[in-house]
Amino acid sequence: MGHSICCFMIKHTVRIGRMVAGIVLLVVGVILALPMVPGPGIVVVLLGLGLLSHEFEWARRLRDWAHREFNRVTRRDHVG
């Protein structure tokens, strides 16, 4: 019984830690992405979304959209 409770607590502690870290990264990334604020804002936002996507469907969809857009923008389809 003690082992089961310990595993349960560890699992939820990791889950809560992942959510808190994701939210913090998301907020810091948004601040860094503001005009006139130096820093890698978009990268930090994507890291936050990556963490939050483990727990939330909306974050997973937004992360997948950002990944598709990145691939679309960086595609090297040259005609000629």
Image: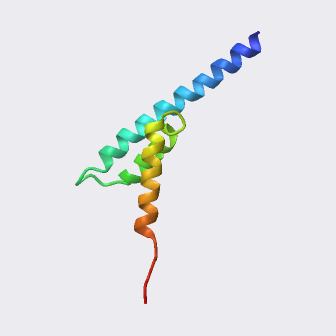
User: Relative to the observer, which residue lies in front, 11 or 77?
Assistant: 77
Q: How many marks?
A: 0
Which percent across, then down, holds residue 70? Answer: 43, 61
Quarter holding residue 78: bottom left
Q: Residue furthest front?
A: 79
Horizontal side of 67 relative to 5 (left or right) equals left
Which percent across, then down, holds residue 24? Answer: 41, 36
Residue ID at (53%, 29%): 17
Horizontal side of 7 relative to 26 (left or right) equals right
Which percent across, then down, holds residue 56? Answer: 48, 34
User: Relative to the observer, which residue lies in front, 79 or 29?
Assistant: 79
Q: Residue furthest top?
A: 1
Which percent across, then down, holds residue 74? Answer: 43, 69
- The quarter of the image holding the C terminus is bottom left
Q: How is the image coloured?
A: rainbow
Q: Residue furthest bottom?
A: 80
Does residue 74 lie above or below 50 as drawn? below
- The quarter of the image holding the N terminus is top right
Residue ID at (36%, 42%): 28
Does residue 75 lie above or below 63 as drawn? below
Residue ID at (59%, 23%): 12
Does residue 78 lie above or below 75 as drawn? below
Residue ID at (73%, 15%): 4
Quarter holding residue 73: bottom left
